[in-house]
Amino acid sequence: MEKSVKGNIAVPATTLLFTIGLVACWYSSNIGVLLMNKFLLSIYEFKFPIFLTMCHMTACSLFSYISIVWMKVVPLQTIRSRTQFFKISALSMIFCVSVVFGNISLRFLPVSFNQAVGATTPFFTAVFAYAMTLKREAWLTYLTLVPVVTGVIIATGGEPSFHLFGFIMCIAATAARALKSVVQGILLSSEGEKLNSMNLLLYMAPIAVVFLLPATLTMEGNVVGITLALARDDPKFMWMLFFNSVLAFFVNLTNFLVTKHTSALTLQVCCLPFTSKSHQHNAMAMK
C-alpha cells in the first residue's frame, strides 16, 4: 500500500510510518533532555552549560564509537578529503554554539518561553537554505510559516519571566540551530561527501569536545572540582548527568535521521506544535 504525499510522488506506507516513528523518537528524547537540562542548570543549580554540553558530546563520541566500531550497527565510513573534514569541523562549531547558547538561555528563561522563541527556527532555516544551496521551497510552504511562527511569537507576549540577555542567547541559539540543520543536510545528502547519520555524529562529536574543553576550563572555573563535590554529596547527581548525556546522544542521532529522511526545513517545522503547547502550559501555570 502506498500513500501519495507530494504531487505524483508515492511513498510506501512503511516508509511513512518509519519517518513518523523517527519524529516521535526525536520529540520524546528532545523533551526529556531539555527538561533535564533545565533541572540541572536551574533547579539543581549546576550552572555550567559549557561543561554540560561537553558531557553530551563525550557521550555521543563514546556511544557512536561503540555502535559503529564494536557493534557494527552501520559500516564505518572514512573522511575523504580535507574539505569534508573542514565542513564537519564547521558543523561541530555551529552545533557547540547552538547548544551552549541554548543552555545558557535556560538559566534565565523558562523552558516554555525558550521553546516558543525557537519557533522562529523555520524562518532562519529557509533563509540559510536559500543562501547556501539556492534551494527554494514552494511559495505555499513559506506562506504557511508566516501564521505559524507569528502565532507562536504572539503567544510569548507578556512573558513574566522575560530576561533580555537570556532572550538574546535564545535567538542566537535558534539561528545557529537553523544553520546546523542546513549544513548537516548537505553533509548527509551530498553525493561526493555523503556520510550516514551515525558516522557524521562519530566524527562531529569528538571535534566538538576539542572545542568545548578549553572553553569550559577557561570560562567555568573549577567545574571539575565542583562536579566531584556534588557527586560526593549526592550520588544521584552523577546518574542524572549520565542519563542526561545518554538522552543527548539519542537527540542528536534522531535529529540527523529526521533531517536525512525529510529536510532541514521539515525538521524545524516539526518543532512548532510542541513549542506552542509548552508555552500555553506555562501561561496557564502562571495564572
Image: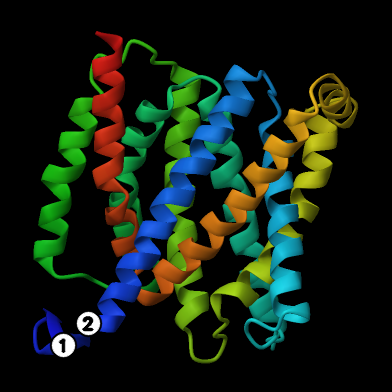
Give percent across and percent down for residue 198. 60, 73
Residue type for callout 2: Ala
Q: Secondary structure at mark 1?
A: strand
Residue displayed at 14% across by 70% down? 138
Around disc 1, counting alpha carbons within 10 Å, would you say few (fewer than 14), some (14 to 19), or many (20 or more)? Answer: few
Q: Is residue 35 left or right of residue 132?
A: right
Q: Quadrant of residue 19?
A: bottom left
**Number of numbered discs present?**
2
Q: Which residue is mark 2?
A: 13
Of the residues under marks 2 and 1, which one precedes in the sequence? 1
Give percent across and percent down for residue 96. 63, 49
In the displayed structure, 38 sits above or below 50; it is: above
User: Does the residue at mark 2 contact the one at mark 1 (Cβ under 8 Å)?
Assistant: yes
Q: Quadrant of residue 253?
A: bottom right
Residue displayed at 40% across by 67% down? 258
Residue 97 showing in the rendered view = yes
